Image (cartoon, rainbow, N blue to C red):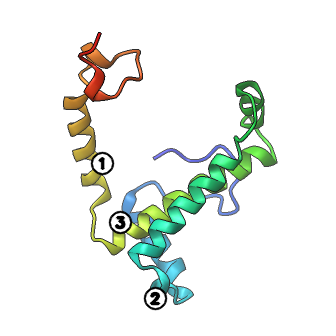
Amino acid sequence: MKKSSTTSHNAGNTLDTWQALLDATRRFRDARDWSQFHTPKNLAAAIAIEAAELQEQFLWKTDKEIAQNLKSGPKRDAVVEEVADIFLFALLLADRLEIDVGQAIADKLAANEQKYPVALARGNARKYTELGDQ
């Protein structure tokens, strides 16, 4: 897992494994007694809401403006925070549903390897159902 390039308030506390991320997230949640609110419905809604807040960071901006905003500063920090929020809620949802995130991602990548063979998918954005339609 790659550490953010922005300055961290927890410098030195690198959470570089799924288990370390999950443990830290559980500690944060449990210290506040928030598990009771983290139902699958609420966590799924939180992911969607945070994803919308991430999308808002790019709304009505040109690609050039976005590239400039993402170099450094408060606009980049806002994007980093929204990405972190999405991951935190996704991790909590996976935990609640007893999903092994590492295995789920490995399985999804394997499925995508079959759906998107390099020979057909390289360099285009077509959906797998359209790859044979050259």
Task: Using the numbered discs, state the Cα–Cα distance from disc 1 to disc 3 in whole angstroms.
Answer: 12 Å
Q: Is residue 133 left or right of residue 24?
A: left
Q: Earlier in the sequence, mark 1 or mark 3?
A: 3
Q: Is residue 126 visible?
A: yes
Q: Residue at x 51, y 44 (%)?
A: 2
Q: Is residue 67 left or right of residue 46?
A: right
| Quarter of the view holding residue 28 | bottom right
Q: Are marks 1 and 2 in contact (CB under 8 Å)?
A: no
Which-is-in-front pick, marks 1 and 2?
A: 2
- Label 3 sits on a secondary structure element that is helix
Q: Earlier in the sequence, mark 3 or mark 2?
A: 2
Q: Residue at x 41, y 79 (%)?
A: 39
Residue 74 or 42: which is nearer the viewer? 42
Which amino acid does the dot numbered 2 rest on?
A: Gln
Q: Is residue 8 left or right of residue 74?
A: left
- Label 2 sits on a secondary structure element that is helix
In the image, residue 12 lies at what x, y percent? 61, 58
In the image, residue 98 lies at what x, y percent? 27, 70
Which amino acid does the dot numbered 1 rest on?
A: Ile
Q: Which residue is mark 1?
A: 105
Q: Is residue 13 visible?
A: no
Q: Which mark is residue 92?
A: none
Q: Which residue is mark 3?
A: 94
Q: Are marks 1 and 3 in contact (CB under 8 Å)?
A: no
Task: Please state, as top left, top right, bottom left or bottom right, where the C terminus lies in the image.
Answer: top left
